[in-house]
Image (cartoon, rainbow, N blue to C red):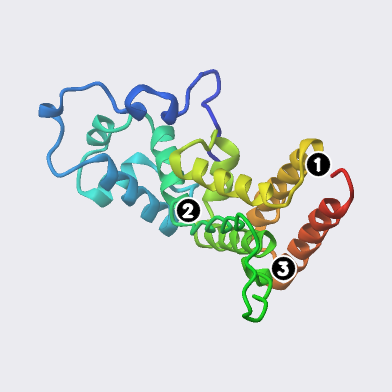
């Protein structure tokens, strides 16, 4: 199992390093035919095929037809590469669009009233889509769940995911401690129930998600929430 840091060693996230952790070596000496993007993509494919426990820089290099040392022109450590692969996988998750802005003033035409926004387009529908998409992602990439627990998970796609979730919770109308609690509940649900994607049936996941959304709706409906 990969841990956030090797025993007795301190490491920082690749996303907190200058230049996103690219080793400070002369590019003229780097092996030809390689770049960080290609190496990251190959890492995702190898993790999908063989799993996290069997992943190694030597196996990755063999698949790319290079020596293991060649990879260290582009990443300093295996941990850096796993962080890059984690964020690459999260980039596959489709994020919900933002809710359309409310009109400045109500229209008063003779046309029939416009139907209310369908539930699928409201915040609850978009949250449901986001949660189900995240579950599918974890089912397709089983190694993502343990890596999200091992690493800070602060890459650009991870931040985009959290921003999308924050916008959905903004749309609930909750504020203060209720808003914080809703964010914590959704995050724990996704990383907990979603992390067991292969062991939880779609029906059970959908039921648990319905209960979670209903709780947020009930809390938002209370005065002062």
> Residue 92's spot in the image, x, y percent?
44, 56
Q: Relative to 211, is 19 above or below?
A: above
Q: Verify CB contact (< 8 Å) between mark 2 and mark 3.
A: no
Q: Extreme bottom residue here?
A: 112
Kindly indicate the quadrant of the structure image that contains residue 146: top right
Q: CA distance from mark 1 to mark 3?
A: 23 Å
213, 36: nearer the viewer: 213
The residue carrying pointer 2 sits among few (fewer than 14), some (14 to 19) or many (20 or more) residues within 10 Å by Cα, namely: some
> Residue 115's spot in the image, x, y percent?
67, 76
Residue 178, label in figure = 1
Q: Relative to 22, is 133 above or below?
A: below
> Residue 137's spot in the image, x, y percent?
53, 59
The residue carrying pointer 1 sits among few (fewer than 14), some (14 to 19) or many (20 or more) residues within 10 Å by Cα, namely: some
The residue carrying pointer 3 sits among few (fewer than 14), some (14 to 19) or many (20 or more) residues within 10 Å by Cα, namely: some
Q: CA distance from mark 1 to mark 2?
A: 39 Å
Q: Which residue is mark 2?
A: 51
- Left or right of 79: which side holds 128? right
- Left or right of 53: which side holds 119? right
- Write the residue at 67% across / 46% down: 170
Q: Which residue is mark 3?
A: 206
Q: Earlier in the sequence, mark 1 or mark 3?
A: 1
107, 206: nearer the viewer: 107
- Write the residue at 54% across / 42% down: 147
- Write the residue at 27% across / 40% down: 36
Kindly indicate the quadrant of the structure image that contains residue 163: top right
């Amino acid at each position: 199992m990969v841990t956030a840091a090797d025993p007795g060693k301190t490491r920082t996230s690749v996303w907190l390093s200058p230049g996103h952790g690219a080793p400070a070596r002369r590019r003229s000496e780097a092996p030809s035919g390689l770049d960080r993007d290609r190496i990251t993509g190959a890492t995702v494919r190898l993790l999908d095929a063989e799993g996290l426990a069997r992943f190694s820089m030597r196996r990755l290099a063999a698949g790319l037809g290079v020596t293991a040392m060649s990879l260290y022109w582009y990443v300093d450590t295996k941990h850096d590469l796993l962080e890059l692969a984690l964020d690459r996988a999260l980039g596959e998750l489709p994020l919900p669009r933002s809710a359309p802005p409310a009109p400045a003033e109500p229209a008063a035409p003779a046309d029939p009233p416009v139907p209310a926004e369908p539930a699928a387009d409201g915040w609850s529908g978009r949250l449901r889509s986001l949660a189900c998409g995240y579950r599918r992602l974890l089912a397709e990439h089983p190694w993502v769940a343990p890596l999200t627990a091992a690493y800070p998970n602060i890459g650009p796609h991870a931040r985009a995911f959290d921003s999308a979730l924050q916008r959905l919770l903004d749309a609930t109308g909750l504020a203060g401690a209720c808003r914080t609690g809703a964010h914590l509940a959704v995050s724990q649900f996704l990383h907990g129930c979603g992390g067991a994607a292969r062991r939880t049936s779609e029906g059970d996941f959908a039921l648990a998600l319905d209960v979670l959304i209903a709780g947020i709706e009930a809390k938002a409906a209370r005065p002062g929430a």
